[in-house]
Image (cartoon, rainbow, N blue to C red):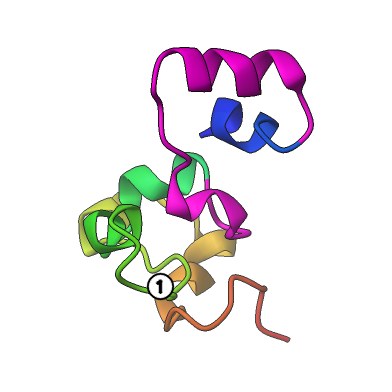
Amino acid sequence: MEIQKQHFCCRLVRSLMEEHCVDQDPRVEKPCAGYACYYCRHAEACKAGETELLYIPRQEIRQLVTEESAYIFDFDGSSIDRPS
């Protein structure tokens, strides 16, 4: 995903992606795109460009998340900002 994000500003990345026929991932413009995609409930739909929802974590990772970050399990897909 980090390489995909460089497509917009790096001529080398852009030319390599074009040379190897790598399409731009539709998730690249989302603020949550990156490692969080691996733990997101709708990763496949997002990768296919079928949803505009932002990161919603899968429940399977709950035991891995620290208490101070547990607020992520309240995400509804509309924001990835920490609740106030």
* Nearest the eye: 9 or 2: 9
Reply above or below: 36 against 54: above
Reply above or below: 12 against 54: above
* Nearest the eye: 67 or 9: 9
Q: Residues within 10 Å of mark 1 (few under 14, many from 20)?
A: some
x, y percent for residue 82: 66, 74
- Is residue 65 visible to the viewer in this orientation of the structure? yes
Q: What residue is shown at x 63% (from left), y 37% (from top)?
A: 5
Magenta highlight on residue 27: yes
Q: What residue is shown at x 55% (from left), y 61% (from top)?
A: 69
Please identify the quarter of the rendering in which residue 68 is found.
bottom right
The residue tagged 1 is 73
Is 4 left or right of 51, judged from the image as shown?
Answer: right
x, y percent for residue 73: 40, 73
- SS at badge 1: helix
Magenta highlight range: 9-33
x, y percent for residue 66: 49, 53
- Is residue 64 visible to the viewer in this orientation of the structure? no
Magenta highlight on residue 30: yes
- Pick the quarter of the image with the C terminus: bottom right
Is 63 left or right of 34, judged from the image as shown?
Answer: left
What amino acid type should be assigned to the residue bearing mark 1? Phe
